[in-house]
Image (cartoon, helix red, strand yellow):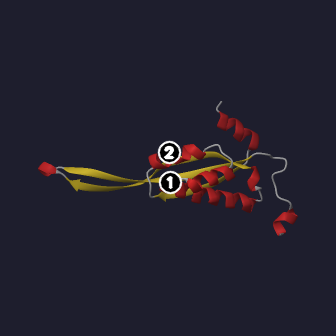
Amino acid sequence: MSKKKVINEQNNILIKSTYKNAHISPSKVRLTANAVRRNDVKSAINKLTFYNNKASKVLKKTLLSAVANADQKGYKIANLYINDIKLGKGMTLKRFRYGSHGHIHPILKRWSNITIELGVLNNNIVKKNKEENNE
């Protein structure tokens, strides 16, 4: 049994956020995603802020959306961590470049789908108090 499944069985609480058709290839996003996978949310946001590439901007946008979803459900941000980051192929734009001797060379402009799943560390003290929500 993998480590991911054990954590999911204990928590049973996952908050998701999806970014579909991000105009960057999944292989480029995967390099940055591996750096922040399994981190708590605050340290992941700090890391993504100081990385200087397009993938970090796309991942940070998706992560902040997942944090907003968790906040909307009433979970404290201090108890959240990144459970999993899934990267998949999106659309592929196909272009061609003319080559020598009548040949054409394909140019594939890949897009990606990004899904971030947040888990909650402590089930006992997860929800915010109603008084904190009103303030």
Q: Quadrant of residue 93?
A: bottom left
Name the quadrant of the N terminus. Answer: top right
Q: Nearer the viewer, residue 15 or 125?
A: 125
Mark 2 lies on a secondary structure that is: helix
Please tell me whether mark 1 sits on a helix, a strand or a loop. helix
Are there few (<14), some (14-19), or many (20+) residues within 10 Å of tag 1? many
Q: Residue 20 in the image: state x and y as whole percent.
A: 51, 57
Q: Is residue 21 above or below residue 7?
A: below
Residue type of the residue flagged with mark 1: Ala
> Which numbered dot is residue 79?
none
* 55 vs 71, nearest the viewer: 55
Relative to 92, is 44 on the left or the right? Answer: right
Distance between the Cα atoms at labels 2 and 1? 9 Å
CA neighbours of label 2 inside 10 A, class few (<14), some (14 to 19), many (20+): few
Whether residues under marks 2 and 1 lie with C-beta atoms below 8 angstroms apart, the answer is yes
Horizontal arrangement in the rendering, residue 13 relative to residue 99 (left or right): right
Q: Find the residue positioned furthest to the bottom.
A: 135
Q: Which label belongs to residue 55?
A: 1
103 vs 16, left or right, is left
Q: Position of residue 134 (x, y in %)?
A: 83, 69
| Residue 66 in the image, given as x and y percentages of width and height | 65, 57
> Number of labelled discs?
2
Q: Amino acid at mark 2?
A: Leu
**Can you name the residue that lies furthest to the top here?**
1
Q: Which residue is found at the position 73% from the left and 60% from the top?
A: 71
**Residue 101 location (% of width, % of height):** 12, 49
Numbered badge on residue 31: 2
Q: Residue at x 68, y 61 (%)?
A: 68
Q: Is tag 2's residue or tag 1's residue first in the polypeptide sequence? A: 2
At a point 53% along the width and 54% down the height, the residue shown is 56
Which residue is found at the position 76% from the left and 50% from the top? 79
